[in-house]
Amino acid sequence: MLLFIVLFACTSQDKQAVGKGLSVAEQLQLATTSEDSAAAVVRASIERHGGDRFQNLDLHFIFRQHSYRAIRKEGRFVYTRSLVDETGTLIEDVLTNEGLYRTIDGKRVPLSEKDSTDYSNSVNSVIYFILQPAFLTDPAVQAAYLGTGLLKGQPYHKIHITFRQEGGGTDYEDEFVYWIHRDSFTMDYLAYNYLTNGGGARFREGYNFREAGSLRFADYINYKPSDDSRLVAAFDSLFEAGQMIEVSRIINDSIEVSLPE
């Protein structure tokens, strides 16, 4: 999933000016399309989670025994995944605007096209999720407002995300739904339906919310629907009805954020 490479796409100045000075509730009242409503909620959520600080950062964290580093600066990015294996060998996958390369003990090694794609997707996916909702205004994103819903008694805006084929990568048919709190604009839940390797659908419940470098981060409980449904827009109802099965935990350890040099 998530075969597209995350770029430094920002909304245009015209889009950022829409609704300036108005509350999100006022913007929703004035919105004439589902896309306008979604954009207002997404902008508020990105600001709540860190705003412009997503664009220039040096992020370190540990995920499933791998060390990750994400450097984002002035439209460029370098994402690195590192692992020291049981023999003491250091393996690093480095993903940049130009593509991915692998080093073993500091020396580049050739990769097949399949391996290069697989490693790129894996590194990109981890970074994509830990920094959400930062990428929900990228040019390939198509956002639609699905209204509101309740999760554990709390009110949420529901935002449906799909991707344009142009710029959306080979997995442009994947879809997501984000539940963004109506009052605080925190992104507390998400769901996705993906097609890679036979596909599937998952629902994630955020927990252990904390801040580092003025950015908001979370860990997640990862669920699948008990009936194998892939209608992600209805996963909040299934979750409330107890029809979700926990399959894993998404735990990001040792998060550190600084400005890139």
Image: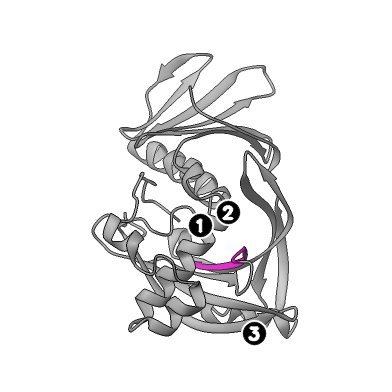
Q: Which quadrant: the N terminus?
A: bottom left
Chief SS of the magenta region: strand
Nearer the N terminus, badge 1 or badge 3?
A: 1
Would residue 243 be visible to someone looking at this image?
no
Residue 215 in the image: state x and y as whole percent: 60, 46
Please say whether residue 187 is one of the residues in the magenta stretch: yes
Residue 181 is situated, as x and y percent measured from the top left of the image, at 62, 71
- Tell me the tag on residue 237: 3
Residue 214 figure quarter = top right
The one of 209 and 245 positioned closer to us in this rendering: 209
Q: CA distance from mark 1 to mark 2?
A: 5 Å
Give the image quarter of residue 98.
Answer: top left
Q: Is residue 15 magenta?
A: no
| Residue linked to disc 1 | 46
Q: Position of residue 82 (x, y in %)?
A: 58, 28
- For the residue labelled by badge 1, is the local secondary structure a helix, a strand or a loop? helix
> Is 257 situated left or right of 144 in this image?
right
Q: Residues within 10 Å of mark 1 (few under 14, many from 20)?
A: many
Write down the residue under mark 2.
49
Q: Amino acid at mark 3?
A: Ser
> Which disc, if any, is residue 124?
none
Residue 153 located left or right of residue 15: right
* Amino acid type of the residue tagged 2 in the rendering: His
